[in-house]
Image: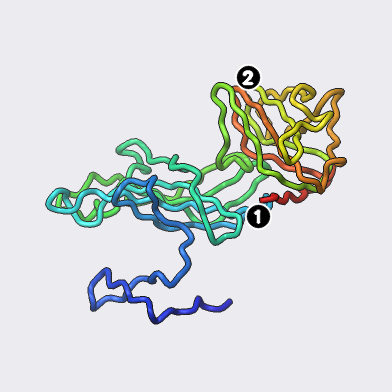
């Protein structure tokens, strides 16, 4: 590992005065930042990046997003505000995007231990099909403990554990009825599985198209068996229970998934019932 090359032409950012050390400047590559979808006075803290080993080319970050309160005289103290944990994703571990601004772990109700600020720990532990992530939370705002009139403090901070099901970080949801059409991709393997929650009344149908979006005979929506219920690994089948898609491997295809009252979290191609995940390459 080598340090990032320093660019002497970039002027230091003396944010805290000339007698303090400057923070890293713009000579470092930008991995994640606020953008136009964030409100004014928003900072990105504590990225908590993790190379996710249970999916292909998947990096996750769980930054604390800090919305500042007004500074004095409009507010009670300097550098104060609330922090929640959001999620960001990357395919290379360098360029991250936040799919939306929904909190990954939301703030708690005022007066609880989660009501002020939250910071995700690095990494996660897998126990079967459950993922455990540890985070620190406090009922105090960022600088609330040192404000002229400090907020009521239950405890400064505690460590908590968040538990969720495998691969269910974010999903594509169709509250009524909707479609998902993937970019052209190539896969290896012979079966397709979905991580999907259709609940009791929802459903999904799956079609495999060619690169131009034309249904491939034997894999159309009309021939798809309906997917119902809540599944981490639902094998997709077509007419007469057909699950073998190996004839389409290594050629450009697109998946078209029609859903109603359902949420799709992930899909994967498998080499068989006892073999691990296979690869997907996007033709983009």
- Circle 2: element type: loop
Residue at position x 56%, y 57% from top? 50
Give the mark nearest the N terminus, 2 or 1. Answer: 1
Q: Nearer the viewer, residue 101 or 151?
A: 101
Task: Tell me: 5 left or right of 226.
Answer: left
Check the image and tell me how it is coloured.
rainbow
The residue at the point 70 percent across, 44 percent down is 184
Is residue 232 at all visible to an observer of this figure? yes
The numbered disc on residue 189 is none
- Quadrant for the N terminus in the image: bottom right
- In the picture, the disc for residue 200 is 2
Residue lying furthest bottom: 8
Q: Position of residue 29 (x, y in %)?
A: 48, 67
Please determine whether, in this image, residue 8 is positioned above or below residue 201.
below
Identify the element where label 1 is drawn.
loop
Residue 223 in the figure: left or right of residue 41:
right
Local packing at callout 2 (Cα closer than 10 Å; few below 14, some 14-19, many 20+) is few
Q: In screen coordinates, is 111 left or right of 86?
A: left
Instruction: In the rendered view, tell whether residue 136 sits above or below residue 30.
Output: above
Q: Residue at x 30, y 37 (%)?
A: 110
33 up-or-down from 18: above or below: above
Question: Is 83 positioned to the left or the right of 77 in the image?
Answer: right
Residue extending furthest left?
A: 73
User: What distance separates the C-alpha of mark 2 from that of mark 1?
Assistant: 33 Å
- Residue 273 seen from this side: no
Mark 1 = which residue?
A: 57
Name the foreground residue: 270 vs 136.
270
Q: Position of residue 57 (x, y in %)?
A: 65, 55
């Amino acid at each position: 590992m080598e340090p990032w090359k320093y660019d002497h032409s970039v002027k230091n950012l003396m944010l805290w005065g000339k007698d303090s050390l400057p923070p890293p400047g713009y000579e470092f590559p930008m991995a994640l930042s606020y953008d136009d979808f964030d409100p004014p006075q928003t900072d990105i803290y504590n990225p908590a990046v993790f190379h996710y080993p249970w999916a292909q080319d998947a990096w996750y970050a769980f930054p604390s997003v800090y919305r500042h309160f007004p500074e004095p005289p409009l507010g009670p103290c300097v550098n104060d505000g609330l922090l929640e944990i959001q999620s960001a994703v990357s395919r290379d571990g360098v360029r991250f995007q936040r799919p939306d601004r929904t909190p990954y772990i939301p703030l708690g109700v005022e007066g609880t231990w989660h009501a002020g600020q939250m910071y995700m720990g690095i990494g996660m532990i897998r126990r079967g099909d459950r993922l455990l992530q540890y985070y620190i939370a406090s009922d105090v705002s960022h600088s609330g403990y040192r404000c002229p009139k400090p907020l009521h403090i239950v405890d400064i901070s505690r460590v908590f554990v968040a538990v969720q099901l495998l691969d269910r970080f974010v999903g594509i949801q169709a509250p009524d009825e909707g479609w998902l059409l993937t970019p052209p991709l190539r896969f290896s393997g012979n079966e397709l599985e979905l991580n999907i929650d259709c609940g009791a009344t929802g459903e999904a149908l799956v079609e495999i198209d060619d690169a131009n979006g034309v249904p491939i005979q034997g894999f159309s929506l009309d021939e798809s068996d309906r997917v119902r219920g809540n599944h981490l690994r639902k094998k997709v089948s077509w007419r007469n229970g057909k699950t073998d898609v190996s004839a389409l491997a290594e050629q450009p295809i697109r998946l078209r998934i029609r859903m109603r009252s359902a949420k799709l979290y992930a899909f994967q191609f498998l080499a068989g019932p006892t073999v691990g995940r296979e690869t997907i390459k996007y033709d983009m």
